[in-house]
Each structure stands twice: as C-alpha cells, then as structure tokens.
Amino acid sequence: MRARQVPLFAVDQEEITETQEWGTFKDSLRAPIHNWFTYPAGFSYKAVESSFKKNGIKEGDVVYDPFMGSGTTNITAKKLAISSYGVEAHPFVFRIAKTKMNWDIERDDATRALKEIEKNVRGHKRDFNGRDKKGYLETEFPELVLKCYEESTLLDLLFIRNAIVNGNFSTEIKDLLLVGLTSILRQVSTAATGWPYIAPKKQKTTSLNKNALYEFSRQIGKMVDDIETTVYEANPNYKNSFHRIFKADSRHTQELILDESVDHVFTSPPYLNNFDYADRTRLELYFFGEAKNWGEISENIRTKLITSATTQISRDDPRYNLSKVLEEACPEVADFLHKSVSELGKIRLTHGGKKSYDHLVSGYFNDMFQVIAEVFRILKSDTKAIFVLGDSAPYGVHIPTDELIGKIGLGVGFSDFKIDILRTRGEKWKANPQRHGVMLRESIVTLLKA
Ligand SMILES: C[S@@+](CC[C@H](N)C(=O)[O-])C[C@H]1O[C@@H](n2cnc3c(N)ncnc32)[C@H](O)[C@@H]1O
C-alpha cells in the first residue's frame, strides 16, 4: 500500500496547474455537448482524456463510470471510439446524459420540430391574450418557480414545455428539445440562481425581458451545431463502439454488466460533503412537474442515491449501522469509522442543527463498499479504477475519504492503491472561528487490480 502525494498524471508545472481543475466542471463548460447542462457536480473531460492516454486505453477498449452524472466519461470515450458503460441513479440527470450521448440527430428533423414549436407557442400566446396569466401559472407551478421568473417569460416557457410534451416528435427529438429547454431555464430566470442554491429574492437584472422562445431556438441550433462539430472531430470509428448506459443503482449492477468485461474505470462519486443532489435540481424538477414538494423529491430521487447528504437520513433506519460485510472485509477501516461515528454522535448533540453526520459517515461507506466491490467484479485483471473525490470534516471531525476508499479497495480484492492530491482546500477558513480548521483535499485514488 502506498500513499504518494504527487499529481498522478502531471509531468511538468503547466500540467500541475491544469490538474487542479480536474475535479471541477470548468473545462467541460467550454466544450461542445459537455456544456449543454451546467452540472455543478461534473468533472473535467480533460481529466478523462488524460487518464485514458496515460493508462493506454484505446479504440475498442471498454470503460465504465458507476457515477455517470451528465455523461462526461462516456462522451469522451465515444469521441475516441472507446466503448463505455455508465450508471446514473438520478432520473433527471440520467436523461441529460442519455441525450448528450445520442449523436444521430438530423439537422432537418430538429429544424422542423423547432418550427412546429414556434408556431404552436405563438398560437397559444395569441389565444391567451388578455387572460389571467398569474392565476393560470399558479395552477401549474409551485411557488419557487413562480418567484424565479417574470410572468410573461414563465408563460412562454410553459407553452414551450407543453408543445414539446404534447408534440408528435420521435423520442430522440423530444429528448433534445427537453434538454434544450432545461439548458435555458436558469439563463432566463430573473432569480440570482447561482448554483448550487436558488436565491429567488435576489434579482438578476440581465435576465429581465428575455425572450424565452428566441433563447430556446438559439440553444437548439447550438446543440445541433455541437453534434456536427463533435462527429466531425471524433475518431470515425466511434460508430463501431457501443455505449450502454443505465438509469440504475451502481451498488447493484450484477444484472447489467458482466464479470471482468471492462478495461478501465474513471469516476467521481458523490463527495462526503452533504451535497444534496436532489435539491440541486429542484427548480428543474418543479418546472417539469417531476416533483411538487420536498416529500416527492425525497421519494423520487433521494432514496435512489448513495448516502451523501444528511437530508437523506431517517435516524431510526438500521441501514446506517456500519455493515457486517464492511466490518469483515476491512477491519481497520471499520475500526476507524466506529470511532469517528461515535465521536460525531456525541458532538452533534452540542450543535443547534443536530445534523446526522454520524449516520452520514457510516451510510456513505456502507454504500461505497458495495460500489467498489461491484467495480472490482466488473474489471478485467491488470487494470485500474480511478476515483476523483474529496474528503470532509463534518463538525470538525476529519474523515480521510481517499485513504479509506483506498483501504476498502484492498478489502474487496484490489492489490494496491495510490493517492494523488489534486488540490487542497481550507486556507481561507482558518481565520474564521465558525469553521473547523481542518485542511481538506481533493484527490485521485487509483485502485489496481492485479
Ligand atoms: C460527482 S457526480 C458525477 C458527475 C459526473 N462525473 C459528470 O461529469 O457529470 C456523482 C453522481 O453520482 C450519482 N449517484 C448517486 N448515487 C448513485 C447510485 N447509487 N448509482 C448511480 N449513480 C449515483 C449522482 O446522482 C451524481 O450524478
């Protein structure tokens, strides 16, 4: 077992600086297709490319991302004619990835659909003239959505949404249009919607009087351009690669992916930092009618994801006791976790919010244990699984996620692991007495299968 603190792929200073952003979505926001949806949890496509290159992953090989998110690993693989599997449990995020992976869209079909939508929306606007906008919108949307838009913009968005949903389009075109509409939702909102939280009280004046139909048409045009550019730049053999992506749970992939069928894993699991993936898509879920309130978001999304936020936890659920399989396979990790969980159990009672960080920690590692065991089963021998992740210090108790994930890897059968630090975080907090003084880090954990 080794824990080296040097950047895994870096060979010179320029690359070292570049790797600092690998855990963030910044590079992907500048790249065609990748940038169709601003996913705050997404990582850099350049990190994926670099990992493929350094590990000799080439055309014809097969890669897997058990936390596919918006599809960064799979899109990058497809462009290089590398086949891929991907699993994503958040239904809304899965639809984004699925749409980004479909490059068989004809410009003429998209243009025809767009014309139909424009005609339909203009017709509805004419018919609606003089009627009670406010009353109508109130029957359609929860308060949060109403607060985020000017009435006329929201009405246009609603007409566009209905024209897509009720239109007679192929599933592929419908998905493209729905993702296009998703892409502009935050752009045309007057709320200072800065990710990750929506702050409807603060107004974004640049979005006042935005024409939603115009922005939508422009976005669809850009998406079709992006597909054409990507296909042009891609390895022409990409058509021979396969891409099987599943709306599923990466803890349970026995029925989906065969034993020893994958050459490389590149992924970023949810970090242990209380980031609520379901809540971060609240505006979109409410707008599309996929959820109306907190309860429905919990039921439809939170319950499907691995434990990574205290909002997922109900304190009397036994699944937050450290699992027997983890205890048996990784006694050293279990020992450390028992101590940390017990400490957190006491500390939480001294804080006003009494957050369930104790259960968060045990639930997170129970779930990650299952995913890592599945990744081991799926990988061929003499391969690597690469996890980009961050550690955390809930209520000031440091949980070195990278080391623990490495050691869990050894427990499920990997022969070795190494840790490379991408960047450290927390310098700024040191002076703040409200915050803990623990320096945190974002790392790459490489598990080696012999
Ligand atoms: C850090 S994000 C990955 C983002 C991705 N690398 C990208 O660039 O878009 C982690 C993802 O894991 C998903 N997830 C959480 N629990 C899961 C589970 N049990 N199975 C599959 N995906 C899950 C979350 O919904 C989230 O999209």
Image (cartoon, rainbow, N blue to C red):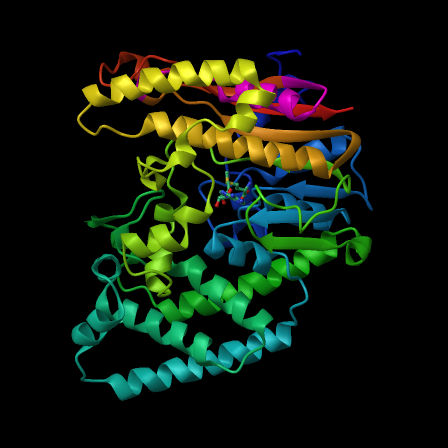
Residue at image x 53%, y 54%? 94
What is the quadrant of the N terminus in the image?
top right
Q: Position of residue 339 (x, y in %)?
A: 40, 14
* Residue 315 visible to an observer of this rendering: yes
Relative vertical location of residue 205 with respect to residue 108 in this rendering, above or below:
above
Relative vertical location of residue 71 with respect to residue 12 in this rendering, above or below:
below
Whether 22 is among the magenta residues is no
Relative vertical location of residue 41 with respect to residue 416 in this rendering, above or below:
below
User: In the rendered picture of this protein, how many numbered marks are placed on residues?
Assistant: 0
Horizontal arrangement in the rendering, residue 60 relative to residue 132 (left or right):
right
* Residue 15 visible to an observer of this rendering: no
Residue at image x 69%, y 24%? 413
Residue situated in front as seen by the camera: 276 or 118? 276
Horizontal arrangement in the rendering, residue 80 relative to residue 131 (left or right):
right
Residue at image x 51%, y 45%? 29
What is the quadrant of the C terminus in the image?
top right
Residue 12 quadrant: top right
Residue situated in front as seen by the camera: 283 or 427? 283
Relative vertical location of residue 168 with respect to residue 178 in this rendering, above or below:
below
Horizontal arrangement in the rendering, residue 82 relative to residue 88 (left or right):
right
Q: Position of residue 99 (x, y in %)?
A: 57, 60
Q: Position of residue 355 (x, y in %)?
A: 27, 30
Q: Position of residue 306 (x, y in %)?
A: 47, 40
Horizontal arrangement in the rendering, residue 340 relative to residue 99 (left or right):
left
Whether 402 is among the magenta residues is yes
Residue at image x 48%, y 81%? 167
Q: What segment carries the magenta color?
A: 395-418
